[in-house]
Image (tube, helix red, strand yellow):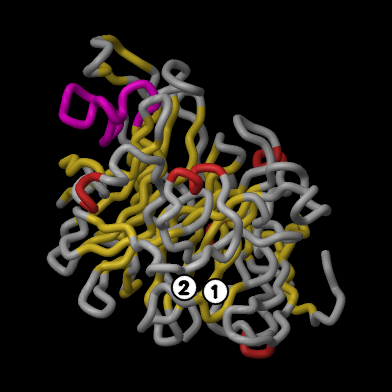
Amino acid sequence: METNNMKVSSWRGVALAGGIVLSVLSCNGPGKGPAGAGDSTASVGSGVNVGSDTSATSLSSTGADWAILPFIKADSVNPVLIPGTGSFTDPIRKEKVAWEEKDVFNPAIVVRDGKVYMLYRAQDKTGKPDGTSRIGLAESTDGFHFSRNPTPVLFPAEDAQKKYEWQGGCEDPRVVEDEKGVYYMTYTAFDGKIARLLIATSKDLVHWTKEGPAFAKAYNGKYRELWSKSGAIVSKYENGKIIATRVNGKYWMYWGDQFIWAAVSDDLVNWTPVEKSAGEADPVALKGQALNMPDLKIVIPTRAKKFDSDLVESGPPAMLTDKGILLIFNGRNIPAIGDSSLPEGTYAGSQVLLDKNDPLKILHRLDHYFIKPEKPYEITGQVGEVCFLEGLAQFQGKWLLYYGTADSKIAVAVSPVRK
């Protein structure tokens, strides 16, 4: 853990009702600098079980009072979801499949009628490259103990989206609702070769209508056949709900898994990626999938010598606040160009604040991760060294942050809701 020119604040620990014990995450306070230059914050988990003392250094003393910190892993209940025994008749194969027997990970979270609903990615042992993915549904009265629906709620079928979803499946959901209570899911369809960002809608979280590729109509279909995923729609988090909210008359979404780009929409279904202005330079050299989409405006780039050196990817739906738009994001590390203290391929989480009047402008960005893999189920699995943040809920006075662990299980970390 870096300590140069940083002051350390930490929680001594929290014990929640029902015997749920949290492990301490210490947090280095950020240094001050020009807007967009980044704040210096680092967090690691100590792995200790602690008592009922809830004292903590205030975030205002760290200089990052715009961020949600600290998050504390709920050790005594983690992982909160593991592979299951459910089966259903696959509509394409026409046979029963154990749809969640291999791995479960990367969930979306919805609070509805006093319960936490988790829409999670589940894999079987067939399909490309590592099994067919489907979206399952589980519910909880406390946010820590879940019961699951026996069958998936979104999956490849004999429908108009089969060509995008078959072989790889439906992956990595994120869910918001509009002011009428209609739910909008962004999810990744994978055909075995290309990932595409798709939209689905629902009124009850169980029955979903597939609306098709998010970028199907933009620029005459320019981005429809190109790699896209991880859509985090800008929303207000109010009374447990995540309500998509317009900024300057448009809905906004952050998306992408090489860099983080942006897109706008009038209806939450049809989205237009934001391109660069004429002559605008990229903040970093293009690589990976970005080489196929050179006209896109990079909103959040990777950073050399840091935990997010290789890749950045959107986390839960972005949060519109009085201070700006808060986006929790995931970063992947390559030690040779990034953080030499983290193993190759480590996924760790951080936060960035963007201008609420200009969603393309970074105001502050934590220089360090606030959560990283350290538990055995986070280090070893389908893909090792992964904490992938994707679901966030405000529930019973707490922020509950759900994440995929090693692409194999699902865990949760907790932070108090500040008043």
Give the magenta range.
151-169
Percent x, y for residue 171? Answer: 39, 38
Q: Is residue 20 visible?
A: yes
Q: Examine the residues drawn in magenta and state their main secondary structure.
A: loop
Q: Residue 68 got which mark?
A: 1
Q: Toward the viewer: 419 or 20?
A: 419
Residue 232 picture quarter: bottom left
Residue linked to disc 2: 326
- In the depicted structure, whether residue 195 falls above or below residue 223: above
Give the percent coordinates (x, y) of residue 132: 40, 24
Q: Residue at x 26, y 16 (%)?
A: 89
Q: Residue furthest front?
A: 279
| Dots 2, 1 in contact, CB < 8 A | yes
Q: Of tags 2 and 1, which is closer to the observer?
A: 2
Is residue 374 or residue 47 the one in the foreground? Answer: 374
The N terminus sits in image quarter: bottom right
Q: Establish if 288 lies above or below 29.
A: above
Type of amino acid under label 1: Ile
Q: Is residue 349 left or right of residue 360?
A: right
Report the residue at 42% width, 45% height from top. 146
Q: Earlier in the sequence, mark 2 or mark 1?
A: 1
Q: Amino acid at mark 2?
A: Leu
State the separation of the CA atoms marked 2 and 1: 9 Å
Callout 2 secondary element = strand
Q: Is residue 318 magenta?
A: no
Give the percent coordinates (x, y) of residue 78: 59, 47
Q: In the figure, 278 relative to 128: above or below?
A: below
Q: Residue at x 24, y 74 (%)?
A: 246
Q: Is 137 on the left or on the right of 331, as rendered?
A: left
Q: Quarter-wise, where is residue 231 in the image? A: bottom left
